[in-house]
Image (tube, helix red, strand yellow):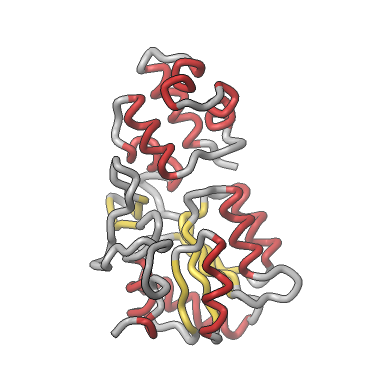
């Protein structure tokens, strides 16, 4: 897996004249936790990234951008086991995210294999996909990269309740339309903004995600309707 985050963390820590143990003491974590972040075997969550940035005296973007290959296209995946449906979803999402690198998969195993070697910023997942559900795939993608945004796709609104505990950013009903996709982009946990030659993930220093594409910026784990559900908006 690409270790841009770990390499950047190690470089910034060295430039700050800090050892792994000193960083660990300031963050109240173990030295081995810092070592795992730098080796790429684990990634800190959003709150810890903000604390790391403050510890190193840099903006959070200095740590986050390598995860999404700053200056290049952000990786977006679409996973749906129905070939005809996937063929409809891909062009709609490409219209909403023209600067992103968008890859489609019918098999969850292939999507996971791709995510192991490519930092995925955003994943659109069908919920019902046979042996491996979209809910399970979401959990496994977030284990690989905690800053992967996940948006569930389904024809059945009631599945949104099953999705609440997965760490996903939103929920969209099929068939997809471009305006609905753009709407959910403004409510991602780690918003994607156009910038430079492609897209980037942006996060405030206080750890709260800023809204993108004109969305309300409502947190995905807050009160109210599921973020990004076009049928929940008045």
Residue reaching furthest to the right: 131
Which residue is at 39% across, 70% downward? 227
Percent x, y of residue 68: 43, 48
27 left or right, relative to 192: right
Q: Nearer the viewer, residue 129 or 187?
A: 187
In this picture, residue 85 sits left or right of residue 222: right
Image quarter (top left, top right, bottom left or bottom right) of the N terminus: top right
Q: Quadrant of the C terminus?
A: bottom left
Percent across and percent down for residue 188 are 39, 61
List the single residue furthest toward the left.
Answer: 214
In front of the other: 121 or 95: 121
Residue 202, above or below 176: above
Q: Is residue 193 left or right of residue 141?
A: left
Q: Position of residue 111 (x, y in %)?
A: 63, 61
Q: Residue furthest front?
A: 223
143 and 89: which one is in front?
143
Q: Position of residue 209 (x, y in %)?
A: 33, 53
**Rendered residue at 37%/82% (across/down):** 232
Q: Is residue 22 above or below residue 85?
A: above
- Up the image or down, 188 lies above or below 142; here it is below
Residue at x 29% of width, y 40% of height: 205
Residue drawn at (44%, 27%) of the image = 27
């Amino acid at each position: 897996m690409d270790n841009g985050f770990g390499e950047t963390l190690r470089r910034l820590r060295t430039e700050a004249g800090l050892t792994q143990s000193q960083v660990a003491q300031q963050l109240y974590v173990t030295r081995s936790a810092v070592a795992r972040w730098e080796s790429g075997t684990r990634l800190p969550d959003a709150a810890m990234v903000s604390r790391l940035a403050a510890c190193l005296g840099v903006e959070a973007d200095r740590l986050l951008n390598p995860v999404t290959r700053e200056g290049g296209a952000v990786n977006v995946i679409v996973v749906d086991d129905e070939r005809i449906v996937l063929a409809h979803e891909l062009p709609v999402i490409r219209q909403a995210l023209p600067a992103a690198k968008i890859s489609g998969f019918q098999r969850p195993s292939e999507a996971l294999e791709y995510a192991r070697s490519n930092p995925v910023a955003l994943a659109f997942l069908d919920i019902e996909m046979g042996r491996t559900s979209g809910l399970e795939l979401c959990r496994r993608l977030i284990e690989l990269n905690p800053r992967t945004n996940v948006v569930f796709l389904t024809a059945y609104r009631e599945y949104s309740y099953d999705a609440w505990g997965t760490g996903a950013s939103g929920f969209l009903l099929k068939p997809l339309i471009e305006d609905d996709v753009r709407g959910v982009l403004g409510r991602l946990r780690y918003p994607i903004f156009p910038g430079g030659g492609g897209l980037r993930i942006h996060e405030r220093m206080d750890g709260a995600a800023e809204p993108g594409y004109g969305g309300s910026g409502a947190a995905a784990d807050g009160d109210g309707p599921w973020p990004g559900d076009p049928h929940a908006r008045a």
